Amino acid sequence: MIRRSLLAAAAAIALASPALARDPLVVGQTFIAAGLDPARGSAGWALVSHGVAEKLFTVNQRGRLEPQLAEAATRIDERTWTVTLKAGRKFSDGTPVTARAIAETLARTVTENAAARASAGTVTFEATGDLALRVQGERAIPSVAALLAEWAFAIYRRDGDRTLYTGPWAVESYEADRRLKLVPNAHHPAGGGLPPVEVRRFPDAQALALAAQAGEVDLAFNVPAETLPRLQRGDGITVKSFPVSYQYMAWLNTTRPALADVRVRRAIDLAIDRAELVKTLGGGMPATGAYAPEFPFSGKAARPFDAARAAALLDEAGWRLEGGVRRKDGAALRLEVVAYPQRPDLVTMLPVVRARLTALGIEVATRVSENVSVTAKEGSFDMLMWAQHTAPAGDPAFFPNLFLRSGAANNHARFADPGLDALLDGFGRESDAERRAEIAARAEQRVFEMAPVVYLLTPVWHVAVSRRAAAYTPWGSDYHIVRPDLRPAR
Amino acid sequence: MFGPICGRRDDLLRHAALSAVLLTALALVSFALPRALPGHPAETILFRLGVVPTPEAVRAFTEQAGLDRPLIAQFVAWIGRLAAGDWGQSLRGGEQVAAGLLERLPASLAIGAGGLALGAAMALALGFAAAAGNRPAESVSRGLAFFAQAVPAFVAGLAAIHVFGVELRWIRPFGGGPLERVLLPTALVALYSAGALARLVALETRRAMAMPFFVAARAKGLSLGAAVRGHAGPFGAIALLAALRVEAAWVVGGTAVVEVLFATPGISAWMVDAIGDRDWPVLQAYLLLVGLWLIAVEALSSMALTRLDPRRRP
């Protein structure tokens, strides 16, 4: 009787196991692709993050650029490169990935998506062989790997109304704003042993944490810090925290009379206690500079906190402490510090920043701007708290070129420094990754000295995983969430 | 002899003219309101895409979306496309707006209309019972009205998910079947509308109970319950219907909080995203749809009230 029961139980387990293995791993996150056409909006980025699309080059776990569908790249001249494709790669319908197919669809992407024209203008693609692609920019392309690792250059093929990709998973079904069902792509090198996956959108992060507690998702990506204690108490739930590349910083508006003085800007930089900010947010790392520590070109030492030195700098600049307030020619030193609600951490940090500046004798007003792009564009702030992925394609040139170069469209600090510009020009001439890192280090030092921006901290995000997804290791911010190492635990 | 027919024709013409004015005004408001929001979609969407909004990038985006034409030309083109059944295309992801609305409307309607219907049924039961002197019903209706005023829907929703989805595990609020997924949000909408509606039903029913006809009915030997149902109840029901006319306004588009919280892809949640992106085609279509819904609700409820309430008949 006992033997029969044991046999029945074993049979049940044997039958159930494949079924369990076939159950999709459910990934909950606050965003989902707005569509399946990578040429539209940021769909290309989301599809790469969902494990559906790939690019010719990508950024790996160590923050380094590496070929994905490409094999290698050779520079022809300042604007032109030849990219050789890996042999044997296929789209999810089994058709081979050829230079011609890529040239056709990337030309369409460049025409339709502004993001694909951001770095090198209108880039043209020409197939010069089955696996050879000639890439020419309207502007110089110092690193074609960095350019083609940008999310806008996701690789796909149009087949009538269908769009096919090369990633480890293929799309089974898509419901706008709700879920994306994925099946393993049998034509991907890793596709054979992968589980089906369902990516589900939870617009509210608190609800996402509850879904993890309820056992409705196997992987809850980016749950709020305040939900961690109750998640950690949950049965079979593990919380994994990891640093992300969205650096928190504050722009100092250098066109404001007080902030035009570099001594005042440096005083503000020194007055911020990054360790205190980390404590306030319940996690993170004091910023070492513009880049998150995962990148080989990131700074190594945390930015200093020295309130005494900050006070001395303000004294030196003529802002004397009178009755607890810094004054110069009778006028008080007043700053308006602005944050935006789309990044709640910035709003959380506002009072801490204010307290530190007030302690220095600066009168501080704080404001939360609903439309930060307008605030940044108008320059209607003294200090603008900001979150930014500073190396989305694994290249250090992106951030300083777009945010710190004189006259750059995203130069929110209105900072102009020929010395820094001369250093940044080096990026246009140099394509070697190590040399580019050296240029970044020199530019970063110059930024520290001139202080148009105060780097605050590198935040950490939290991922809650069920027993099934316990082996998952998060990295790469939200650029690579669903990856081939997402497999059910045995 | 032809007087009544001429009168009816005049009425029809007047109604047609009024409708045309109303629809034109609605279309104008739907078109203008999104454009009154600070921020241009080109800058907002490019910013969200991580693209530097250089003047060239903004110009290219604006031209591609057809937003560079004079406002009047954009309006006329929009109306022309609407007449042909084309509601436009989302600026954010290129999704067809009409298809997007159709895809999301069932979830919004299920939550909004289902919740309101359930709330109305609860209000009738609680209101009649409270009017008839049932103390627990009185307390529950007062409690629900107080709850709706005091507790934000967001907090109540999170608590409901925690209790029923996490602790008790009676339902799967996010991953269950369609019915399972709308159960909690619908109940939440019902709870938030039932209290105030029940108070109204009770008040109007009590008022009717003070009328001579009600006293006469009771004097004839009718029980309190039967007299309330047969004689005072209709007054409570008419008051409920009049109140529902106002409440029904938010059935389409007023359930954003629960849609976001329960991860339900309804049109309200879509609207919230569209506001963030300044996605004008989605916003103007949404406003138009809500306006049309309000007009339909007003017309239908007026007809129903006229039919039910003899005092409203000419």
Image (cartoon, helix red, strand yellow):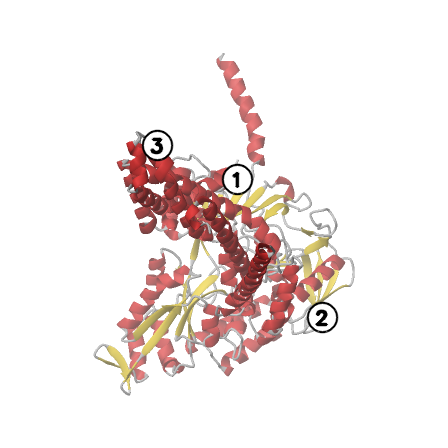
Mark toward the start of the polypeptide (1 vs 3): 1
| Residue A421 horizontal/vertical position (percent) | 53, 79
Seen as rendered, the residue at the extreme top is: A1
Left or right of B210? Residue A247 is: right
The residue labelled by disc 3 is: B226
| Mark 1 vs mark 3: in front | 3
The amino acid beneath tag 1 is Pro
| Mark 2 vs mark 1: in front | 1
Seen as rendered, the residue at the extreme front is: B1
The residue labelled by disc 1 is: B178
- Classify A244 as above or below A78: above
Which element carries disc 1, helix, strand or loop? helix
Residues at discs 2 and 3 both on one chain: no
Q: Which mark is residue A76?
A: 2
- Classify A148 as above or below A378: above
Seen as rendered, the residue at the extreme right is: A129
Left or right of A210? Residue A71 is: right
Which sits in the foreground, B226 or A386? Answer: B226
Q: Quadrant of residue B88?
A: bottom right
The amino acid beneath tag 3 is Ala
> Dot 2: within a 10 Å radius of its alpha carbon, few (fewer than 14), some, or many (20 or more) residues?
few
Asked whether the beta carbons under mark 2 and mark 3 sit within 8 Å of each other, the answer is no
